[in-house]
Image (tube, rainbow, N blue to C red):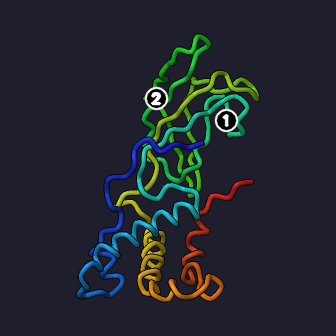
């Protein structure tokens, strides 16, 4: 299981950029706060829908005996989208003391849904069994500069859809209004983590 150790402190889509996308030139009192709230909500919704980290956050992932994680002798997978850095890898020894791996030569290969981590000489597993339980602390997600254009557009489309339909959504039942605008789910499905 992935645990968020440090939440994101920066905004990946500035309000001005969203207002330009939405073609909003003047705002009613309180609308800026509403738009910021809808943007944050759209990011959280997209993170939940795709199961990847969109905003850059620091995570902890514990690999334990009996878990079904993909693990090799010197490599493992992290399934939270793009990993920008690995902060530390610690393993628990038999006496319950912790040992920190030297991650100087770590290699990270990012794919849309997951990242493959290589640390040569680490010996995370022996054959099909864990050598020792270990915990990885890593940063995953995007910043304003690295957020893919298609994902940024999908988030803004969703926030704009909620903004334009805020009154309608309160009076109509769920069967009569779409959960997200057409095209948004197509983009999100490209990033969606499929669990087999």
Which residue is denoted by mark 2 in the rendering? 103
C-beta proximity under 8 Å, tags 1 and 2: no
Q: Indicate left or right for 82 with 36 as reference.
A: right
Q: Quadrant of the C terminus?
A: bottom right
Q: Which mark is residue 71?
A: 1
Q: Position of residue 78 (x, y in %)?
A: 58, 44
Which residue is rendered at x = 67% and y = 22% of the image? 131
Residue 23 position (above or below residue 89) = below
Give the x, y percent position of residue 138. 46, 40
Q: Secondary structure at mark 2?
A: loop
Picture residue at 47% right of the left edge, 22% below the top: 100
**Most foreground residue, 71 or 26:** 26
Residue reaching furthest top?
A: 95
- Compared with 139, 118 (above or below) is above
Q: Is residue 142 left or right of residue 183?
A: left
**Secondary structure under badge 1?**
loop
Q: What's the residue at 56%, 58% (across, down)?
A: 112
Residue at screen point 39% across, 60% down: 146
Query: In the figure, residue 132 lies in which quadrant?
Result: top right
Q: In front here: 179 or 80?
A: 179
Q: Toward which corner of the image does residue 133 lie, by quadrant? A: top right
Q: Which mark is residue 177?
A: none
Q: Does 104 appear above or below 12?
A: above
Q: Position of residue 110 (x, y in %)?
A: 53, 50
How far across and down, in percent of the image, does residue 127 sit? 75, 26
From the viewer's perspective, is 177 left or right of 22? right
Determine the image quadrant of residue 159.
Answer: bottom left
User: Gap in Å between the C-alphas at discs 1 and 2?
Assistant: 17 Å
């Amino acid at each position: 299981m992935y645990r968020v150790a440090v939440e994101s402190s920066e905004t990946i889509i500035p309000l001005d950029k969203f207002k330009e996308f939405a073609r909003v030139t003047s705002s009613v009192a309180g609308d800026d706060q509403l738009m910021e709230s809808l943007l944050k909500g759209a990011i959280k919704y997209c993170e939940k829908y795709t199961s990847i980290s969109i905003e850059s956050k620091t995570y902890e992932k514990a690999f334990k005996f009996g878990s079904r994680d993909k693990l090799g002798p010197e490599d493992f997978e992290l399934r939270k989208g793009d990993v920008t850095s690995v902060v530390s890898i610690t393993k628990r020894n038999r006496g319950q003391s912790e040992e920190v791996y030297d991650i100087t030569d770590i290699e990270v290969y990012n794919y849309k849904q997951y990242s493959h981590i290589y640390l040569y000489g680490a010996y995370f597993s022996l054959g099909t069994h864990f050598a020792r339980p270990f915990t990885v602390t890593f940063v995953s997600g995007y910043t304003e500069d690295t957020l893919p254009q298609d994902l940024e557009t999908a988030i803004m489309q969703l926030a704009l859809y909620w903004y334009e339909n805020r009154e309608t959504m309160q009076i109509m039942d769920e069967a009569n209004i779409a959960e997200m605008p057409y095209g948004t789910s197509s983009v999100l499905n490209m990033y969606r983590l499929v669990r087999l």
